[in-house]
Amino acid sequence: MPAMKGGYSDAWRNYEYRRRPPDDETKQRQELFDSLNHYIHKNGGWLTSVPGARTVRFEVLPGSDLPEKLRALGFGVRPAGSATRILPNAIRETYIDEHRERRHRDHHGPR
């Protein structure tokens, strides 16, 4: 909690600081983040980081080639585990059953 002076808080100074226009480095980082977000979304992924973050996190479906595409562009991509994402559209899962036959399982989104 900021110190009180004359009955007023010094919080307004922090407010004024936050309202300053972004510097060139911040603008450049925001533009890169927006471009990366567009590229990841266009290639079937989801950027889940806070806009402008230095380190970004994204999600892809299993088997996606997006991580390799980003590596080819020079980004350092590392796996960060797996999670469940509920999608609003259908997904077709292809698998090999115990008789070595290719099978499909459809997962439908909300109706």
Image (cartoon, rainbow, N blue to C red):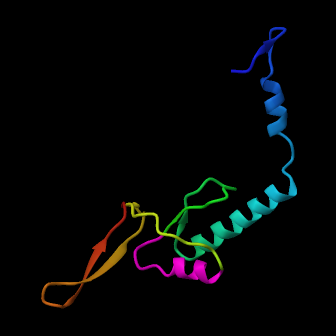
What segment carries the magenta color? 60-73
Q: Residue furthest left?
A: 99
Q: Residue at x 80, y 8 (%)?
A: 7
Residue 108 lies, in percent from the top left, at: 33, 68
Apparent side of residue 46 relative to residue 98 in the rendered image (left or right): right
Given residues 73 and 44, the one toward you in this image is: 73
Question: Could you tell me how many numbered marks the image carries?
Answer: 0
- Quarter where residue 2 is shown: top right
Quadrant for the C terminus in the image = bottom left
> Is 70 contained in the magenta span?
yes
Apparent side of residue 73 relative to residue 104 in the rendered image (left or right): right
Residue 80 lies, in percent from the top left, at: 46, 64
Task: Say above or below: 87 vs 10.
Answer: below
Q: Residue at x 60, y 61 (%)?
A: 56
Task: Say above or below: 68 vs 89.
Answer: below
Q: Residue at x 75, y 59 (%)?
A: 30
Apparent side of residue 39 relative to residue 108 in the rendered image (left or right): right
Task: Say above or below: 8 vs 24.
Answer: above
> Is 80 contained in the magenta span?
no
Residue 35 lies, in percent from the top left, at: 70, 69
Residue 19 lies, in percent from the top left, at: 83, 39
